[in-house]
Structure formats: C-alpha cells, structure tokens
C-alpha cells in the first residue's frame, strides 16, 4: 500500500488532510479515488491505514482506520556525514542510504571536495535532497523521515558531533594498514537507541588536518571491509553492515 | 598504486607486456613513464609490483619486482543473478557489486523485466559490462576479475544453479511476512571457499511461476533487512552483509 509522510498539523483525531505534491501523486499518478486505501505516516514514527473520503485539486481527506504496530526502523540512529562528492553521487547516497535505514544526512564541504557549493544555491539543493529522501522513505516503507542538514564545514561538523554517542570516520588508510580492529569490535559497543555518526570523505579522502580534527574530537577510524570502496559505496556498506549486525542476526 | 588486469599470456618470468586500452590509461590518463611503478594482476589472483621499462603507443613493458602476499578477496565466492532492471541500474550493480567483492554476475531476463534485450545487442552490452567490472576491480584493488555471463533465462539459471553450494533468492514477501528466519541463520551455514548464488528480481519482483521454479531447484528465500529495498540496492545489501559476516567480525 502506498505511503505518504504527512505533517503533524494535518492530523486530527479521525482524519488526515493531505496537501501539496502528494495530492497530485494520489490523484494523477496512482489514480486513486474515494474508498481507496493508503498509509499515512505521522512524524512521530507512527503510521495508520487510512481510507480516502474526498478528493479535490487542493487536498485529499482520508479517515484513519487503524494505527499500525510494525516498524521498519533501525534500532539505532545512524547519521551519515558525507564529504561533498562529484556529480549526482550525493543523490545516490541519499536515496540508497534512506532505503538502508539512515536517520539523517549531513553533507559537508571537505577540503578535497572538487565541488564547491554556491551558498545561494544550497537552499534549493537541500529542498531537492529532502524530496529524494521523502520518496525513498515512502518506497522503502520507512516510518521516520530522515533529516538532511544544510552543507556544513568540518568545524561545525566537529562542534555538533558532541551530540552523538559514537563517532566514526571511514579512513581509507585503515583498510590498508594491517593488523587493525575489525568492524564488529566497534559495532559491539553500540546499544539500542544510541546515536551514531559516520563521517565519510569525498573522492580524494580526508586531508591530514581534517583527520587530526576528527580524531581530536573523538572520532574513531574504522575500515569498511578489506577492499577500497568509492566514496558513494562507503555509506551503503556502513548502513548495510549495521542493519545486518542489529537486525539480521539470530 | 594503480592496478591493471593482464591476461596470463602476457606474463613472462620477469616481465609483463600490457596492451590495448590500458596502454592509453597508463601513458595518457596517468601520464606514467619508464621507472614508474604499477601493480599487475595475474588471472590466478596473484598480483605483482612492477616497474615500467619501455613505453610505446602499442604496449607498455614492465619488469616484475615482487609478488604481493595480501588479498582483498572475499573468502567465499558470491555470484549475483540479477533480473534485468530498467535504465542503467545494471551498470550500478556491476560497479558497486565488484567493489563489494562479488565473484560474478548473471543478468537474466525475468518475466517482469520491463527491458527486453535484443539478442543482437547482447554481445556488445556484455563487452561494456566487462569493462565496467574491470575498471571497478582495479579501483577497489581486487585481485580476481569477476565474470559477467551472457543474459540467461530463468530455465538456464535454474539448470546452472546445481554448481553452487548455497542458493538464495531475495524475496520481498519474506521481508513482510513475520516471523521468518534472520539472515545470519543462512550465512552461518556457509563455510570458507564455498560458492554462493544470490538471485534478485527486477523492479516488479518475481512471478509466482519463477518463485516456484527457484524453490523447486533448492533456492531458499532470504530477507535483506526489514525495509523494502529497490532492486539495485538488494545486491549491495547482500554483498556488504556477507563481507561483514565473513571479513569484519572479531
């Protein structure tokens, strides 16, 4: 059943009012009418099966039939801090990272990022990124919508990292240097409900100065398997292996 | 150091002769000259540090300095059978799957594949796929070049599946149906050196008839985490979680 993320203010006790792009999606793309059923996600993470009552060009009003118990959310909160990569790789990371259960994304301007973002265009890009994340969340049956922060600097990233329980940096040198601790050593230290921040560099990796700043702030270097991964693959490896560790072990 | 896959016939006792596209890459893209060092991968999986002796438009001749001991190969052999997806998603799966350690890829025409491949164009496409896999192997420091099969039918896929020790199918219904066995239950049955085949459907999933054929042939249904993944994300989840299970646990 199709899912839609709806702001809390649009929920009443028995009905939900859907506005904006989702109206077009419900009426034109899915061609649904009154009597059809959808799932509405509340920002709290709860989700309800709803039946369409009325349809107009401006809004779709649905009745709440019953609240669902199930959750497809990772039992830990994982935020990916991604050094700005080239081309449309960030969009791939946002889409796939959302499918794989990320709680949020912090794109940051790394010193080796080839792309330099124009401050004037950031707001528009972030809007687009939020749309990608919303669509991926609906497709993968997420009940929580991952957040996308505005582009940060390494300084603000480090300053904000104090709010996380575990801070990791995927450092390519760690893959090459042997012997080193394996990934499960770090994952075993994380417990349900904790906040994890994983920092990944752009194509050229981190500068010495960035690595020093991150280590000083308490980030631990981790390896993501023994092969050298492209920057856009690193976040996906980290999320898939965290999912396996926390959700797919007997 | 840059890596190149070189056919066995081009290796002599002390030198390696590099031909074809790699000559362009070494001389024009990397702008290397005699005295510079590269790594040459032998098809057996061995790799050697080599020094460039001579450079011409047709070939680069290098001397073998020393053979490397390290390996970045998964301790099990994983082949991904992928139902033909839309657009350029197969290229994404080949590139990322190679980085994540796959041994081979079998694209197959599934009954719900929107794309229908023209037999005349298959040879050309396979050539392109092999190039993507070769480049990704070099970038991720693989020592074995994953194979890419010609497009198969579900019948030939099932017939060839007898050569594998473990056969899995990523079946979306398994994610939704609870309770079900977790992924580690299946991974725990795999031992080092064994051959694993993972079959993934196209966007629309498998037909009832295909699932029946696969189950009859001994394929076991697995889930890849509790979220619904797009077809191109499924192979990456499977490979990353196998890497975590076999390479990153203490």
Image (cartoon, coloured by chain):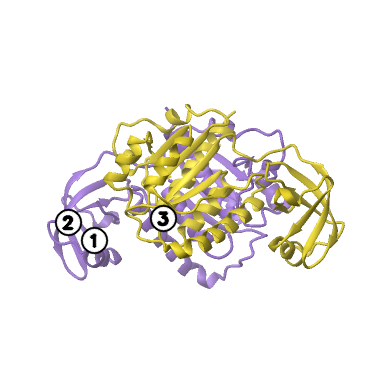
Chain colours: A purple, B yellow
Residue position for label 1: A18
Q: CA distance from mark 2 to mark 3?
A: 37 Å
- Give how far apart the Cα atoms at labels 2 and 1 are: 8 Å
Residue B150 vertical placement versus A27 (above, below): above
Tag 2 near tag 1, CB within 8 Å:
yes
Q: Which chain does the numbered disc 1 sit on?
A: A
Residue B243: % across, % down: 55, 38
Q: Specify whether residue A155 is in view.
A: no
Residue to which mark 2 is pinned: A62
Decide which of A120, A20 is in the foreground and name it: A20
Residue at x 35%, y 56% (from the top left corner): B113
Describe residue A48's horizontal placement relative to residue B235 as left or right. Answer: left
* Dot 1 crowding, Cα within 10 Å, few <14, some 14–19, many 20+: many
Q: Position of residue B52 (x, y in %)?
A: 84, 56
Residue holding disc 3: B84
Of label 2 and label 1, which has the lower sequence position? Answer: 1
Residue lying at the far bottom of the rendered structure: A120
Q: How many angstroms separate mark 3 from mark 1 (CA)?
A: 36 Å
Using the rendered image, report if marks 3 and 1 lie on a common chain.
Answer: no
Do pointers 2 and 1 mark residues of a single chain?
yes
């Amino acid at each position: 059943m199709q899912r839609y993320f709806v702001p809390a203010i649009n929920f009443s006790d028995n009905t939900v009012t859907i506005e904006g792009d989702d109206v077009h999606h419900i009426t034109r793309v899915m061609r649904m009418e009154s009597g059809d059923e959808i799932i509405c996600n509340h920002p709290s993470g709860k989700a309800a099966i709803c039946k369409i009552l009325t349809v107009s060009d401006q809004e779709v009003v649905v009745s709440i039939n019953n609240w669902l118990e199930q959750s497809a959310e990772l039992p830990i909160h994982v935020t990916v801090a991604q050094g700005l990569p080239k081309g449309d790789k960030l969009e791939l990371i946002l889409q796939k990272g959302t499918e794989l259960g990320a709680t949020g994304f912090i794109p940051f301007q790394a010193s080796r990022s080839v792309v330099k973002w124009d401050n004037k265009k950031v707001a528009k890009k972030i809007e687009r990124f939020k749309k990608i994340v919303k669509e991926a969340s609906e497709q993968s049956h997420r009940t929580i919508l991952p957040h996308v922060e505005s582009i940060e600097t390494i300084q603000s990233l480090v300053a904000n990292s104090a709010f996380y329980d575990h801070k990791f940096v995927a450092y390519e040198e760690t893959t090459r240097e042997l012997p080193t601790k394996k990934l499960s050593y770090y994952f075993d230290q994380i417990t349900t409900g904790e906040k994890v921040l994983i920092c990944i560099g752009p194509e050229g990796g981190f500068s010495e100065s960035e690595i020093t700043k991150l280590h000083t702030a308490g980030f631990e270097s981790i390896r993501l398997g023994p092969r050298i991964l492209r920057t856009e693959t690193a976040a996906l490896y980290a999320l898939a292996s965290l999912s396996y560790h926390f959700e797919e072990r007997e």
